[in-house]
Amino acid sequence: MLALVIVLLPLVAGALLFLVPRDDARLSKSVGALVAATLVVLAFIERSQSWTWRWLTHPFIANIHFGPTYLSYWLVVLLTLCTFGAVLSTNVSRTRSMVAALLLLEGTMAGLFLARDLLVFALFWDAMLLPVFFALLSWGENPATAWRFFIYNFAGGLLLLLAVAAFGALTGTTDVIGNPAYHGIVSPWAPWILAGFAVAFLVKTPVWPLHTWMPPTYEATPAPMVAVVSAVQSKAGLYGFLAIALALFPSYFSAEVPVLVILAVISLLYGAFIALVQQNVKLIVAYSSLSHLGLILLAIASLDPIALRGALVYIVAHGLFSATLFIVLGYVEEREATRSLAHLGGLGWTNPRLTGAFCVAALAALGLPGLAGFAGELVILIGVYQGGYAWAVILALVAIVTAAAYMLRLLQGATQGPVRTDIPMRRDLTWLEGAAVAPLLFALLYFGVYPNALLGLHP
Amino acid sequence: MMLLLALVVPLAGAALCWAFGPVLRSTAGWLATVAVAISFVLVLLTGSGHAALFSWMPGFDFGLMLDRLSLLWALIITGVGFLIHLYSIGYMDGDRAFARFFAYMNFFIFAMLLLVLSDNWIGLLVGWGLVGLASYFLIGFWFERRSAVAAAQKAFVINVVGDVGMMFAIFLIVANVHSISFSDAFSAASSFSPALLYAICFALFIGAAAKSAQVPLQTWLPDAMEGPTPVSALIHAATMVTAGVYLVARCAPLWDQSPSAQMLVGTIGALTAVSAAILGAVQWDIKRILAYSTMSQIGYMIMGVGIGAYAGGIAHFFTHAFFKAQLFLASGLIIHALRNEQDVRLMGGLAKRMPLAFWATLTGVLAISGIPGFSGFFSKDQIIAGALAHGHPWMYAVGIATAGITAYYMFRLLFITFLGEYRGNVDPAQLGIKREVQSSVAQEPEHHRAPAWVMGLPVAVLIAPTIAVGWLLFGSSRAPSPWSRFFAEQFSPGLTSAPAIPESLTTIITFCVVLLGIAIAALRYATQPARTNAVARLRAETERMPKVLVNAYYVDALIDLVFVKTARFLGALFGRVVDPHVVDAAVRESAASAQGLGSLVRELQSGLVRAYAFVIAIGVGCFLIYYLVSGVGH
């Protein structure tokens, strides 16, 4: 029942927020923060209860079935933490609409991760596009970006839906996610169905060469939302690989592994090198995401149990630091009114608290030992090496060195160097702004020192 | 438990200084200094021990360990660290980020202790990375200076190259022993194939070379002198840069079984020792001279531990920690007094003005040059003799030659700085100094609150060990030195043969070469004509300096060309050409041919697509409604 509450509460609250008559920023932010905080608590205490309701019996059995699996438990925790931070950090025009969109996004993504039924999963897959699409249309400068995002992802969503329908028609039920009794499909059609799933997941993650919607989308989406999108929505594809492709198509998935390994490694290096030369701070983080998500896909494709553990740690770690980075970059943009590295500098003196948060997130992103990103990277690569991909490990290490270079370039470019005098007085983080990122930073440190906390529940 | 406390106290100090800096103000310095002192006492009281702490990941257990080797390092880190903290209270007085400085310094102590106290590879790697972070913060401490920012970045990135090498070694080890503890790896080492052992040692040594500024990963260390001088003394001389020596000594069971890995490490150490010493002879910045000498001396240590002369290699770490900290702190006295002037050409005649700095530098120079009786003599002698005993005659030769060069450039430093007339009022151009626009020096100390003794006392205290600790190494085969008895159980003696040249003769040869170096330096800088014509002579020397040495053998330029420029080129190629014009175009084209999506995308740009998307949405809606209705219907 709790799972259903986690899905419905933000959806209802988000919809009700539109009832706030005028654009009362304070009221809507307070309500949003309250709901988001409640959800953080619920997500933590929600362990194993599931809720199910028979939906279809024909042409196949489908249930409205929600409940956390081991993996989705952490994803929902991550989602609620990031949404809480995003709501608190919201400082855009039409705050009410943004907070509502964030809650709707939270509800749809909670639905996606908690869904135990493929058809429900597919529905939420498309539904979670809508808040982002809406935000891109409302706050983005170029509607073409919004449409590009939507069409690209919707095309993936269609393939996913077809694949689900075919899966249901073949096996008679779609209530199979995280079902230990279900051992996978055997059918000549299975490779095609898997391909449908895989393409949708690759687009969503995204993975080279299906990533070209992502940088413009991340750039145009307002900071609080892109924080959630990059932190959590990008994990939908990886979650799909783990919970659907790997779990339901075990034998067929291993046949696709060589392709995935190559795509993952290309993403890993390609994103890293592009991030090295970008001038736009949001694009640096966007391309670094391409690189980091490539690493997680590599872990999944290596099929090594240690690498899969590392993938979980890194999924959470990447969510935490990319959300923090985007929120912090939003703060920077509010103060400096620019996203260009060429126009930033010297924030360390004027905004020490902001710089501190920026610094921790950037260091986590470049894999500083002691923070969660490192734990994930190290364990992934230990596993990938054991899985027999020594060459991929070496290329990944090249990407790690590159990551140090581009993350420091970003961090130092924005916070160090002479203080820029051409911009008027800038205030440091307010405590509310700090509270938005503090839980994320704390989690980065905690899981970095003690990653076993993420794995302790492992069956 | 005390061991954990020794680790946590400096961390707590760092956190307090960082969080409450504005409140603590000058108290922060004392707080941090006391934290290091407590840590020192705790390490000393613990003596030895092992503490299992927690499970980092299933099967990967994290714990702390204090054996003879880590005890030595921990005592130097906290002991010398304490003196340098005390000194910094005076040196950093009036800096607007005073508390932040001490937060970083205490954090460094924590990280370095973690590095040497960990009983496992991951703890080592975490410490390894965190000392790099502390070093990064402190090199870039005055981060409004662009040169400091660039130096910090370079140091960090090169150190990440080293981290990555160590990570690869860990992958190799974990894949073979399925455990992260040192002891498991060392006991399994005998079953490794030679190729695997060499690969592990090679990868580990990438980390060691990056951290200890060994060829070819050395270029960051001279630039690291951008940091405040106490930082150079603590991190870039006494402790962090010797982590590579610690690593090789810690992994002695691996190196002992891989002669080719020993050869590699010994060769790199010897190469670094001599090449850095040559560069040390052509520097004008007092801190850069010391930086190259640090690099060169660490080359000795690496050579020592590389060839299996572990006791000698770490003995040189021990003595070097004192005399190099001494030299840096003395140079800090000068830099502080001369308002951040670091160019020795603009010094001169300081012996009378700054007697403490003079005597401290003098003892340091005597020690590093290996004058008999001073600490550096004993340890350097052990390494040079060890090279021959372990069967590496050319390393022996390099060791002796480098000792001569070392004596030359250190006495050069001493003479130019302290003899003759003060040249601070001479126009820099007359000395051949080309100054770019004077980078605005960080901050002038605004007001002095700290008592004068806080800077003087550590320098004075360090004079004693700089002279004396070498005698701990004094012994013979019949009556082993206290040092070799202390480390007897830590290291196996290894294969040594009776050297062709007896040790006493080696000592004499080395001493003669050292005297030669001193004599050349004296002729060039200390004679009466040299002192009176100092300005013209220094100018001539500046102008005749070989380009290849001034540019440090062009290693920087080469790295820039091969790695940095290539990476940027790839980034630009992928980002500006491949991404928009190949990948995106291909996706659009294939979408167009496959599903007619291309027309959709084109329509999108003309603004008519909403209809299409609407059609798709309706289509999907119908599909869902069909299932919903038909499902419920049954």
Image (tube, coloured by chain):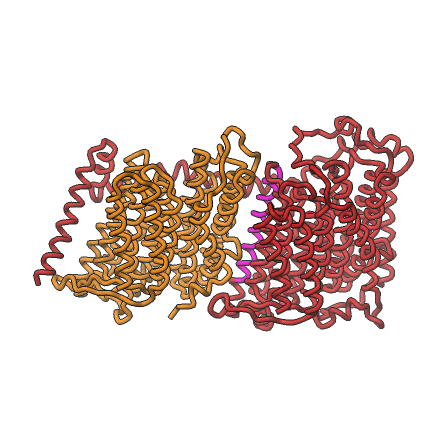
What residue range appears in magenta? Answer: B147-170
Please give left or right for residue B570 compared with residue B132 in the image. Answer: left
The colour with which the image depicts chain A is orange
Which corner quadrant of the image does residue A217 belong to? top left
Q: Residue at x 35, y 43 (%)?
A: A26
Q: Nearer the viewer, residue A368 or B15?
A: B15
Please give left or right for residue B257 compared with residue B419 in the image. Answer: left
Please give left or right for residue B566 compared with residue B43 in the image. Answer: left
Q: Nearer the viewer, residue A33 or B97?
A: A33
Dominant secondary structure of the residues highlighted in magenta in the image: helix
Would you say residue A42 is visible in this rendering? yes
Which x, y percent locates residue B373?
87, 57
Q: Quadrant of the C terminus of chain A?
A: bottom left
The colour with which the image depicts chain B is red
Q: Is A193 colored magenta in this rendering?
A: no
Q: Residue at x 32, y 34 (%)?
A: A141
Q: Is B163 colored magenta in this rendering?
A: yes
Q: How many marks?
A: 0
Would you say residue B279 is visible in this rendering? no
Given the current orientation, which residue lies at the most extreme right position? Answer: B528
Q: Residue at x 50, y 39 (%)?
A: A414
Which x, y percent locates residue B434?
71, 29
Please give left or right for residue B169 compared with residue B587 in the image. Answer: right
Which corner quadrant of the image does residue A166 belong to? bottom left
Q: Quadrant of the N terminus of chain A?
A: bottom left
Q: Residue at x 47, y 57 (%)?
A: A372
Residue A408, relative to residue A185: is it above or below?
above
Which x, y percent locates residue B384?
78, 58
Which x, y percent locates residue B21?
60, 47
